[in-house]
Image (cartoon, rainbow, N blue to C red):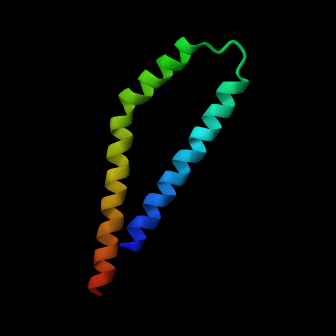
């Protein structure tokens, strides 16, 4: 279970890093408007489902690997 927690924490760390990078890019982008931000958020939310499925798949693989190792 520690392995699953480790991978979850790593994914959360990556998410925080991406959010920081996003905020830095947005803050330095001249001519940036809230409408553009909303359009980007809408696009991301629409495509988030696929990303969520990919993460869930990776978690299942890690869990299965952990269970196989625990059985050995």
The residue at the point 46 percent across, 24 percent down is 41
Say above or below: 31 vs 27.
above
The residue closer to the viewer here, 16 or 55, is 16
Say above or below: 56 vs 1.
above
Q: Where's the C terminus, which quadrant?
A: bottom left
Say above or below: 21 vs 3.
above
The residue at the point 60 percent across, 46 percent down is 17
Picture quarter containing residue 52? top left
Q: Position of residue 62 (x, y in %)?
A: 36, 66
Q: Where's the N terminus, which quadrant?
A: bottom left
The residue closer to the viewer here, 61 or 37, is 37
The residue at the point 29 percent across, 69 percent down is 64
Judge left or right: residue 69 versus residue 44. left
Judge left or right: residue 8 versus residue 25. left
The residue at the point 39 percent across, 41 percent down is 51
Q: Position of residue 36 (x, y in %)?
A: 55, 15
């Amino acid at each position: 279970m520690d392995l699953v927690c480790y991978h979850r924490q790593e994914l959360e760390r990556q998410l925080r890093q991406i959010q920081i990078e996003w905020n830095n890019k947005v803050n330095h982008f001249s001519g940036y408007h809230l409408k553009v931000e909303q359009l980007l958020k809408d696009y991301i939310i629409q495509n988030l489902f696929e990303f969520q499925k990919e993460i869930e798949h990776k978690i299942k693989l890690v869990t299965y690997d952990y269970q196989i190792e625990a059985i050995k």
